[in-house]
Image (spheres, helix red, strand yellow):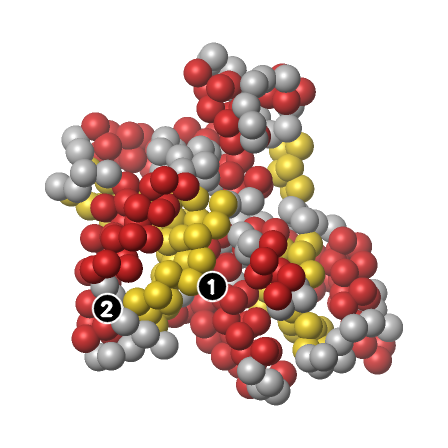
Amino acid sequence: MNKIGLIVDEGADLTPEIIEKYQIAVVPLKVEWPSEIMELPGESIFHKMREADKRGVKIFCKTSQPSPKDFLDIFKAQLEKFDKIICTTVTSKLSGTYNSAIQAISFLPEEQKNNVFIIDSLSAVCGEGLLALKAAELINNGNDIEMIVKELKEMPSRIHLYAILEDPKWLEHAGRISPMVASWIRKAANFGVRPILGFKEGVLKPIGVKTGVKDVPEALFKELESKTKKPRQEGKKIKVFISHIINLEGAEKLGKLIKENLDNTEVVLISLADYVVGSIAGPGLIGLAWYAE
């Protein structure tokens, strides 16, 4: 048994297979849906969101970070199995999840407080997921806690995330982007320009555009191809994680483009985004995160 355990919040988008393989504990994120949407047809909440949009029903769900107690309960459970634990969280610039995790440590017995290490991913979805996968890999390889924590704290600056929305309305309604940014995204799309969102120092912002592309997978592929050209030429290995919101066909097309056209590049996971991020970003989104090693 490893002496180091791993905890992530639900926003890391890890699959059940990965969670089971590495004995990862997951702290749920919280979202409250209005009763109107729950009564609509659809196989998932994301399909219900699409149906609500078609009917002109505005969705205002409530999201909240896990409480310190949510983290404390899982810290205690993992500390019964492991000597030390590492916990990665969604960016602290958009959620209080990181602060809840930090607060939870203060409620642990004195002898256990120094056995918990919290890492702010400064990202979300596949970006946070890549950090969590790196943590699992480092733990599984038997590295000591000091080395693992040092590397994980340095990693957020090396992880790059690109995402393209089907429509910015969901982020705008949730207050995650301004009406001005939402308007810019809509206008650009009308002219065949694909605006790309990403994280800069933990904050979600427009980071670029792609023109002359057929669809979202191609736009994201072209961005990845361009940004990874130098490290790939230097022989570095590129690791990619793809998240989507009920757009598996587009996510798989993106994965295929990467596999067939980019050397030294591995798609480590394609996963459905969690409900909280999905409720904010909206159906149709595709995002990818990458880093070079």
Above or below: residue 54 compared with residue 66: above
Relative to 188, is 90 on the left or the right? right
Mark 1 crowd level (few <14, some 14–19, many ≥20, 10 Å Cα): many
Q: Give percent across and percent down for residue 170.
A: 46, 31
Kind of residue indicated by mark 2:
Asp
Residue 130's mark?
1
Q: Nearer the viewer, residue 160 or 130?
A: 130
Q: Which mark is residue 34?
A: none
- The image quarter containing residue 139 is bottom right
For the residue labelled by badge 1, is the local secondary structure a helix, a strand or a loop?
helix
Residue sitting at the far left: 212
Left/right of residue 279 with respect to residue 258 in the rendered view: right
Q: Residues within 10 Å of mark 2 (few under 14, many from 20)?
A: some
For the point 17% across and 33% down, the residue is 192
In this image, 244 relative to 221: left or right? Answer: right
Give the mark nearest the N terminus, 2 or 1: 1
Q: What residue would you read off at disc 2?
A: 263
Query: Three-letter amino acid code at disc 1?
Result: Leu
Q: Position of residue 8 (x, y in %)?
A: 62, 60
Q: Which element carries disc 2, helix, strand or loop?
A: loop
Q: Nearer the viewer, residue 38 or 188?
A: 38
